[in-house]
Amino acid sequence: MNHPAKGAAKTPYSTLPAHAFWRSAVAEGGLDRLSEIWRPKFTVAPTEPIATFGSCFAQAIGPALHRAGLTWQICEKPPRTTPRDLARAYGYGLFSARTGNIYTPTLLLQWLEWALERRVPPTEVWIEGNGLRDPFRPRLEPAPFETEKELFKMRDVTLRALRKSITDARVLVFTLGLTERWIHAARGYEYPLCPGTAAGQFDPTKHHAAPLDFNAALRAMRKALDLMRSLNPELRFILTVSPVPLSATASGAHVLTATMGAKAVLRAVAGQLAETRRDTDYFPSYELITSPVTAGRFFATDHRSVTPAGVDFVMQHFFTGLGLDPVPVALPPAPSRRNRAAASQKEICDEEILSAFRPRR
Amino acid sequence: MIRVCIIGNSHVAALKHGAESLCKRHPDLQLGFFAARSNKTGGLAVADGVYRPTNDALADQLALTSGGQREIDPTDWDAFLIYGFGGRPQPGDFAKGLSRNFRRDLFAQRLSRSLLPQHLKALRELTDAPVFAALAPLLAQIPDARRNRLLHHREEVALVQSRFCDPYSARLISQPDATTYKDLYTLPKFNTRSVPLENAHADAGSRHDDRDRQHMNSRYGVVWWEHFLPILQAALPQTKQLQSDKTALPLSLRRVLGLQDQIG
């Protein structure tokens, strides 16, 4: 749809603002003049605690909130004097609690049900060398835990922190990442990664793929939001969809179509919730990175990792939407192999491990 | 004669005071203290076969603590002791809710940023003589004790020995059991009336603030030397042995050291 010509008959499009038309909002201005892409449902004051969870792309959001002067709430912290690299290596400062990446709506719901004591967390552990891995965050720490007692104690610490982050936050930002998931067939619980990839051993009699369709994802996300509101009726949600493509798919489809299919489902779920719930908004980080106007310039050479400039670009629109002064972002030039080779993703993306299982030719 | 060179920071003051009675009992023991506050001995550098200050202020400080020597010539000493590095957790640190691996890595990172690795490397570059190291004493026991620890001392010792000392064929000396409480803290009696480094080599009577939980007193120094001397002698040739007379110790210290049976 173009701008209506002068003198043309009145239609519902006749009085729409410039941002409603592709030519004026996108084609003529390009990235530099892209504006009003997000008009928040609610304001977020700098003093209001914001919790962040989600897939690996979400790791960039919390630190950006902090840099912008907003109150990023972290409820599971290392000692103050811990060097930043060490903290990150142990999963601190990535999300509001050390849940590791939460890729799917059902995984979020599972963590919440454990934290709110609606379900008892499983006692399954994975043996690695002389130590033990937590199946629900297998790469949280560089080395395995030494005892079961310690593993469960550390998980309890995280569950308490997760609960506190929901209780104390005023806004929770959740980034949806995947629809493919792996479950324990008999017991029904979900693993963040396919057993046998990051740790553990795959057993086809126990471990089943259980991809989410739109209805299942929507149902789980609704339950998760309701559960959090039952603990904190003041809590509001900002949902985003990770623009990071799948590292691999076990669906039988090509990874490209599987990626676009999953993102379409998640985008639709987030949109549906934003349209039907007053407490929920959708922030378009997915569109800002992947839409035609960016022409892929925010992806690194693997066409998967989002560059730091891409993260900055997304967060600039986030802060602009909230009426805050964003830090100006120097937009990268149109994509070329050379430009993108220099950029690299900083996030800890467990799902990347799946690439290691690619057959070599 | 056994000649021991001690390189350290403010914690050396307790050793200096503790050594006074020790040297009276062992006239054949010669101790050389090369100490400066905090991380100031980081200004030492290997040059021309000696460990030499890179600035005059440090040279002056070393001359003050050593009794006139402005640099460390490794040929002057039979053994070396690096003492007091690896600062203790500060208020605001906590160990609750941290995995053991994390606590170990955090402790190791802190130690890697101390002067211990520098001094170990430098000394091993200069000499084949025995090199010993000892960490800063455990903090004196405080009421909210659980909030101020990362590792038990035995675990610290094993970690530092394997990660830092073994590569330089050095030995880490643990804090004497008689001075510790639950392997986490120093008994408060070893902390009262501790003396700052600047007064450890003079007769000035100033003391550390009563709230200071890091620095130990002369009593601690005595116990520490009694703990260390047998280890030192075992590392030296038979020709380098001290005459030992533990009955010369004050009765209270003999009790601390568990020597009652020998004096009864």
Image (cartoon, rainbow, N blue to C red):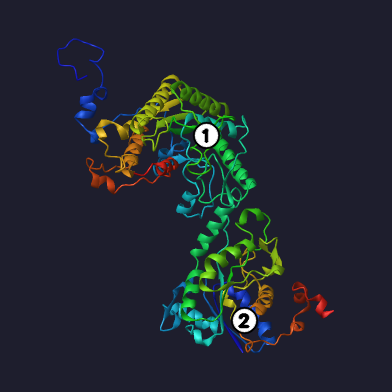
Which quarter of the picture shows residue B67? bottom right
Q: Considering the numbered disc 2 on the image, is that residue within a helix, a strand or a loop?
A: loop
Q: Mark 1: which amino acid?
A: Pro
Residue that protrudes farthest toward the right in the picture: B264
In the depicted view, which residue is nearer to us: A249 or B82?
A249
Which chain's residue wears label 2? B
Q: Position of residue A95 (x, y in %)?
A: 48, 41
**Residue bearing mark 1:** A204
**Residue bearing mark 2:** B203
Q: Mark 2: which amino acid?
A: Asp
Q: Considering the numbered disc 1 on the image, is that residue within a helix, a strand or a loop?
A: loop
Which chain's residue wears label 1? A
Using a 10 Å C-alpha cutoff, classify the residue at mark 1 as few (fewer than 14 neighbours), some (14 to 19) or many (20 or more). few
In the depicted view, which residue is nearer to us: A122 or B48?
A122
Q: Nearer the viewer, mark 1 or mark 2?
A: 1
Q: Position of residue B20 (x, y in %)?
A: 66, 82
What residue sits 47% from the left and 50% below the top? A89
Q: Position of residue A36 (x, y in %)?
A: 30, 29
Is residue B141 rendered to the left or right of residue A87? right
Which quarter of the picture shows residue B148? bottom right
